[in-house]
Amino acid sequence: MTMTPLDNWIRAKTGIPETYAPNSHVQGCRSESELKQIARAIEEYQLEKLRETLGYAKTRSRFYRGHLSGTEPENIKTIEDVRRIPFTAADMITKTPLDFVCVRPGDIGRIVTIPTSGTTGPPKRVYFTNDDQELTRDFFHHGMTTLADENDLVIIFLPGKTTGSIGDLLLRALERFNCRGIVYGPIDDYQLAGQALSASGAVCAVGLPSQLFALSRFHPELNLKSVLLCSDYVSAAITHALESTWGCEVFSHYGMIESGLGGGVDCSAHAGYHMREADLLFEIVDPVSGDSVPDGKSGEIVFTTLTRRGMPLIRYKTGDISRVLPDPCPCGSFLRRFGPVSGRTTAGALMRNGYNITMPALDELLFTVPSLIGFSAEFTRGTGADTLTITVFAAGGTQAARDAGRRIIDDAHLGEHINDGLLKLEIRQGGVGALTYGNTKRGITGNTGPAVKNA
């Protein structure tokens, strides 16, 4: 099993002594004392960078000058002290994005606009300098060596026409280890995309989980070496479907625009995300109280940028639910691992009895239906029972719709609510055109409510 290439990269960036270099060890054979020393070295690096970031943001950002008025960098001496720093919420950026910016307008290399999901409010805008984007290219460079080799050809089903867009950054990163790339862009025609992939001779594909899943349904004849799924949430059902259909190894990447796109990527062990700890300080907190939670327990992902200059973010609440995996990775890495994102704190369909229906749960149920290409979900509260409407996009016929309905009815929780008359289920068939999700996050539409912890 190959160790994640992020080990050597992060060791060099954080100054971990050469004696702890991954190549000097038999994989997975570091002693407990060594692992503790490495963890302390990373922690000391992160605390130093955090204090620098706090001082920088307080001096240069109008927002953080006020937001951090009670926080002095020199008082942050341990990881426990980080809890004293106030959180940054997404709506704070939406209201006054320019107040976060720490550089002159001419130093901004790219502005990314993020639509506000489910509302008519203003979008979020995130600002990056060219040096900030270089940090992302550097992460992509080392992360992509996990699944692609020199002289491989990678097809990128992500936006890439604009300089500094995710596809462009990924393309430039591949060039750094003599790997070739083609930026196709988001898929809007699955027949054409499959033909382009086949004609290109690409052995690796990068894209959104739902789009690559649909592409595999239209073109099961394709054969790839590896696939990278880029999203905040990757369904295990989609991963297994791609592996069995295309005979490829499937890797997952976690990240968001606010984190600088790169957050973490899994390795050949496929046992969680190795995090980008040289550039980002990650925490898991209780989404309600904000208190830190122990390793192994689920909570909200919070991150602080440690090396970004255009628009640093401090204790930014992502809304994504995950957990720190307490045991070392089978690949032998010393890096912390996060488990797959299991949902969002503000998403889901909250039934009147308190049960929360989430898109990840529906994904795991429905993406196992053989002829299904994709689906959408809508939730409506009624005066009596609530209604869940599933629109199924299938390769042909009505079998997929029947199978989707059966999957939901047979589910231990949803089936119970249906049998008790608390939830009505409607299954419809839809057109393939609705599968073009672009970069928007998939979710349940309708009069949904905030997520709660299901019993």
Image (cartoon, rainbow, N blue to C red):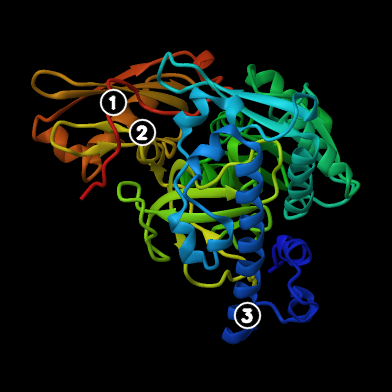
Question: Residue 245: image x %, image y %?
Answer: 59, 41
Of callouts 2 and 1, the N-terminal one? 2
Left or right: 326 with respect to 134? left
Left or right: where does residue 165 sit relative to residue 112? right
Check contact, mark 1 vs mark 3: CB within 8 A.
no
Q: Position of residue 139 (x, y in %)?
A: 74, 49
Disc marking residue 448: 1
Identify the amino acid type marked 3. Gln
Measure the alpha-carbon separation of dots 3 and 2: 39 Å
Q: Residues within 10 Å of mark 3 (few under 14, many from 20)?
A: some
Q: Nearer the viewer, residue 450 or 245?
A: 450
Read off the residue under disc 3.
37
* SS assignment at label 2: loop
Q: CA distance from mark 2 to mark 1?
A: 8 Å
Q: Nearer the viewer, mark 3 or mark 2?
A: 3
Dot 1 falls on a residue whose secondary structure is loop
| Residue 317: numbered disc | none
Q: Is residue 89 above or below residue 141?
A: above
Residues tagged 2 and 1 counted as in contact (Cβ below 8 A)? yes
Q: Nearer the viewer, mark 1 or mark 3?
A: 3
Q: Position of residue 189 (x, y in %)?
A: 64, 17
Nearest the viewer among 443 and 248 is: 443
Three-letter amino acid code at the position of disc 2: Ala
Of labels 1 and 3, earlier in sequence is 3
On screen, residue 256 above or below 164 = below
First in sequence: mark 3 or mark 2? 3
Q: Which mark is residue 347?
A: 2
Real-space CA distance between mark 1 and mark 3, rounded to the nearest whole angstrom: 46 Å
Labels 3 and 2 touching (C-beta < 8 A) = no
Identify residue type, mark 1: Thr
